């Protein structure tokens, strides 16, 4: 069974054939692929240079040249790989949350009549966020391949880890081509049916926190052309089973036209939009495309983010059908910036609204809302095709 599964996965990934031992040992570092002195791995192509670390299979730096030709490091991260485990508070910086991204209500779910409990890690034990206290983005993945423009990480998640049923093996490949970052995530359930939902939890500030007028991302412009609906949540951001309309001109309307992230921050409607007493965004927008006929996800982006100051814009293409936006409402000036970011004359920290997280994923907590009919995209057993997530981030400079 394991061999069959691994063969299927390597075929899917078009990786060179690797031995079972290599796949199964997907849990430590492989000295055949040395990192730089900061524990990072670089890949590059024209107009783009990115660094990654085994911890969480995370992107730690993404350098894009702005309209003046100056490289800006547009994602949050730390200066070196070892610091990610030192600062345990790190809010999933650039990593791959897993085995099930976002929140699981009551830390329970049911598969084929059996109720499973996973380890809660949020709101005093009321839910599980991003796969539990030792989710995938708190573990060191193995580097299984590294070339000048591509890197692949693998992880073996044992049966029962964090309470999830069955063993899962995952591969994440990041590739760059001119001005473009591609990611492909696959995961294979080896022994038992289990929930799988991954994402890339990357924090963006397209000015590299170097706009002298503002350390914030509130002036970034966001467009979500296919997102007229969002998933309703309660005061602690747990999906409550409802789907809500993002009415035109409401604070959640990013579909009818592009809008600055901060455009509606003074609107009374924004209070409570990201949980009780919270003003801003931490919302799962649904991506609805079928109404326009057959589509190729590589053709039109589900999101566009841009900054007037740097001129840097990014378009996100994906086959995923939900898109979480978090406007860094929980940041409060304690998380430090990298040396490659910020300015000398102000604190090198992330302020509230300093960044924006864009997570490609599926409908959050779909495993507890069977009427949404997401099971074929969220529950995987040994007989199923592997879980796959693909996304492409295309950068441009205006
Ligand atoms: C490390 O990677 C190299 C190149 O793919 C491979 O030959 C070697 O067996 C790997 N070592 C382990 C322990 O996985
Ligand atoms: C890593 O894999 C090896 C070989 O399968 C196993 O002996 C070891 O316990 C694993 N380590 C962890 C931390 O999972
Ligand atoms: C790693 O980065 C952190 C945060 O910038 C810094 O405090 C620490 O000294 C660095 N450690 C090493 C070994 O470079
Ligand atoms: C992960 O790797 C870093 C070095 O990059 C190391 O400092 C840390 O102890 C490792 N953590 C685990 C859980 O193995
Ligand atoms: C919440 O989880 C507990 C187990 O931790 C379970 O006994 C209870 O039935 C669950 N409640 C709901 C509404 O699912
Ligand atoms: C942000 O955008 C608003 C509205 O377009 C504008 O008034 C303001 O000057 C901008 N601030 C910065 C720092 O660019
Ligand atoms: C939100 O901002 C947009 C763009 O400035 C505006 O058209 C809309 O009326 C605002 N909505 C609310 C509820 O303030
Ligand atoms: C929300 O804010 C109000 C007014 O400041 C306060 O009374 C209440 O305790 C807050 N609720 C929560 C859950 O923080
Ligand atoms: C700021 O955020 C950090 C990390 O979430 C938290 O530990 C700290 O208590 C917060 N500080 C304040 C003053 O709210």
Image (spheres, rainbow, N blue to C red):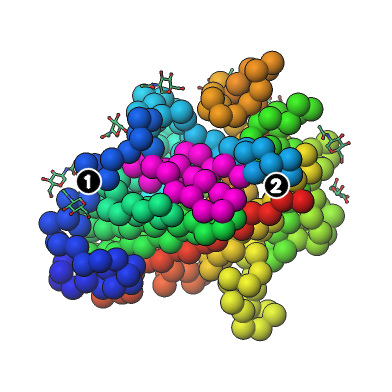
Q: Residue at x 68, y 30 (%)?
A: 210
Q: Is residue 90 magenta?
A: no
Magenta residue span: 41-64
According to the picture, the residue beneath numbered tag 2 turns out to be 312
Task: Kindly report the secondary structure that dominates the magenta region of the rendered protein.
Answer: strand
Q: Earlier in the sequence, mark 2 or mark 1?
A: 1
According to the picture, the residue beneath numbered tag 1 turns out to be 32
Mark 1 CB near ligand 1 (8 Å cut): yes
Residue 344: tell me if it is visible.
yes
Cα separation, mark 2 vs mark 1, equals: 36 Å
Q: Determine crowd level at label 2: few under 14, some 14-19, many 20+ residues with C-alpha closer than 10 A.
A: many
Q: Residue at x 30, y 54 (%)?
A: 145
Q: Seen from this angle, which residue lies furthest bottom?
A: 293
Is 341 left, or right, of 142 in this rendering?
A: right
The secondary structure type at the circle numbered 1 is: loop
Is 5 left, or right, of 180 in this rendering?
A: left
Q: Quadrant of ligand 8?
A: top right
């Amino acid at each position: 069974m394991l061999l069959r599964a691994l063969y299927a996965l390597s075929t899917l990934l078009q990786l060179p054939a690797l031995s079972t031992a290599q796949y199964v040992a997907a849990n430590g570092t492989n000295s055949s692929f040395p990192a730089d002195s900061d524990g990072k791995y670089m890949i590059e192509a024209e107009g783009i240079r990115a660094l990654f670390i085994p911890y969480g299979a995370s992107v730690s730096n993404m350098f894009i040249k702005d309209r003046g030709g100056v490289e800006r490091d547009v994602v949050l991260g730390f200066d070196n790989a070892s610091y990610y485990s030192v600062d345990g508070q790190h809010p999933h910086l650039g990593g791959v949350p897993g085995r099930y991204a976002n929140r699981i209500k009551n830390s329970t779910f049911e598969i084929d009549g059996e109720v499973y409990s996973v380890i809660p890690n949020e709101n005093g034990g009321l839910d599980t966020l991003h796969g539990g206290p030792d989710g995938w983005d708190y573990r060191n993945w193995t580097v299984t391949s590294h070339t000048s423009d591509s890197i692949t990480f693998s992880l073996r998640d044992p049966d029962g880890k964090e309470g999830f049923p069955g063993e899962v093996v995952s591969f994440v490949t990041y590739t760059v081509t001119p001005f473009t970052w591609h990611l492909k995530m696959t995961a294979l359930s080896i022994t038992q049916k289990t929930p799988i939902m991954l994402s890339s939890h990357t924090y963006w500030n397209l000015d590299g926190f170097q706009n002298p007028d503002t350390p914030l991302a509130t002036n970034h412009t966001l467009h979500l052309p296919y997102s007229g609906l969002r998933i309703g949540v309660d005061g602690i951001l747990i999906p409550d089973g409802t789907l809500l309309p993002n009415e035109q001109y409401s604070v959640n309307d990013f579909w009818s036209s592009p809008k600055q992230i901060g455009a509606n921050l003074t609107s009374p409607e924004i209070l409570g939009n990201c949980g009780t007493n919270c003003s801003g965004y931490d919302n799962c927008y649904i991506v609805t495309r079928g109404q326009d006929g057959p589509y190729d996800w590589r053709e039109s982006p589900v999101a566009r983010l841009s900054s007037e100051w740097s001129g840097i814009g990014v378009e996100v293409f994906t086959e995923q059908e939900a898109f979480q936006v978090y406007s860094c409402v929980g940041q409060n000036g304690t998380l430090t910036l990298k040396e490659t970011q910020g300015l000398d004359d102000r604190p090198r920290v992330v302020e509230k609204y300093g960044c924006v997280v864009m997570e490609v994923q599926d409908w959050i907590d779909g495993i507890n809302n069977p009427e949404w009919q997401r099971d074929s995209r969220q529950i995987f057993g040994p007989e199923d095709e592997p879980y796959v997530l693909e996304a492409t981030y295309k950068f441009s400079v205006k």
